[in-house]
Image (spheres, helix red, strand yellow):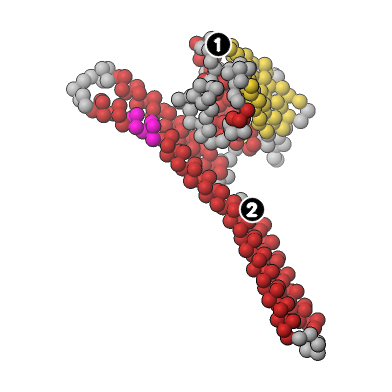
Amino acid sequence: MIKNLRKRFILFSVLVISSILVIISLLVYLGPTSTLSIQKLAATILISIGMVFAGSWLLSKLAIMPVKLAWQKQLDFTADASHELRTPIAVIRTNLELVMDSPKKTVESQMKWLQNIEAENRRMAKLVDDLLTLSRADTNQQVLEMTDFMLDETISKALIPFTPVAKQKNIALEARLNSQTTFYGDRRRMEQLVVILVDNALKYMDGSGKVYISLMQYEKGVKLEVSDTGSGMEPEHLAKIFDRFYRVVNNRKQNQDGSGLGLSIAKWIVQEHRGTIRVESKPGVGTTFKIILPIQIKKV
């Protein structure tokens, strides 16, 4: 946005300078012996000034448009964040009141309320961390730590915590990873990307099914796919699935633990690695996230 404003300011400056040069050139060309009337000269100057003002008004309108959009986006972001934080804060407060109302009871007897507080505290901590990530990304303060690493090994590591979860839900977690896939990028963020996609797939599965992860290397980069055999999504959701705080609650069961920020962060990670991410989904069939990551050139 700042770059666009800078370009428009330069364009405005060029317009003003050009108009002034036109007026000066006209005066020099006419000279004191010109038969052109003072009225026509004045009219020419006024028209030039009018063009400058018209151009400045138009450019200022164009320049302020992204500022308005950014401001509205920031207001929406703040409102949504406040809404999401309100629930865990209310739950923590309610459970604390229950504990404080019985000061003579043992910790063991109050364990149910304390566990609720702990769960909501973890949820709120994750939400704050996600908000901080997106906020820093918006201001270009989130810098990737680029290194060479084995992408297949990183994905395998990210899948380990999900194995017991999948088994408990009777979901087959399968992975086909192209071995010895060297990648230049942020190892931690790529692991986070896989965690977000697989976590979503498992949480939104209705009963038993399969979650499949594939990694293929080709000439210009790598292809990563995460698919599930869940209930899928209606077409109208696909264009909004990466929007912040957007959650599908119609065909796929609502995730009470989610904040709707995971896929926004996933998209940011992919874009920061100069890649693309898209989603394909059909109701009753399942959902597939397809990611293309180009080969990164290590800077010397």
Q: Quadrant of the C terminus?
A: top right
| Point 49% across, 41% down: residue | 77
Instruction: Estimate the x, y position of residue 72 in percent, counting from the top left.
Output: 52, 47
Which stretch appears magenta? 86-92
Q: Residue furthest bottom?
A: 33
Q: Amino acid at mark 1?
A: Ser
Q: Residue furthest left?
A: 104
Q: Is residue 214 left or right of residue 263?
A: right
Badge count: 2
Q: Nearer the viewer, residue 11 or 300?
A: 11
Q: Is residue 90 magenta?
A: yes
Instruction: Estimate the x, y position of residue 274 in percent, counting from the top left.
Output: 68, 37
Q: Is residue 288 magenta?
A: no
Res. 210 visible in picture: yes
The 10 Å Cα crowd at callout 1, few under 14, some 14 to 19, many 20 or more, is some
Report helix, strand or loop for mark 1.
loop
The 10 Å Cα crowd at callout 2, few under 14, some 14 to 19, many 20 or more, is few
Mark 1 and mark 2: Cα distance apart in space: 50 Å
Give the label, 1 or 2, closer to the camera.
1
Q: Upstream in the sequence, badge 1 or badge 2?
A: 2
Q: Which mark is residue 43?
A: none
Q: Which residue is mark 1?
A: 208
| Point 69% across, 40% down: residue | 299
Instruction: Estimate the x, y position of residue 233 in percent, counting from the top left.
Output: 59, 24
User: Residue 240 sits in which quadrant?
Assistant: top right
| Point 66% across, 31% down: residue | 277
Q: Which residue is mark 2?
A: 3
Q: Nearer the viewer, residue 254 or 82?
A: 254
Q: Is residue 180 above or below residue 74?
A: above
Q: Amino acid at mark 2?
A: Lys
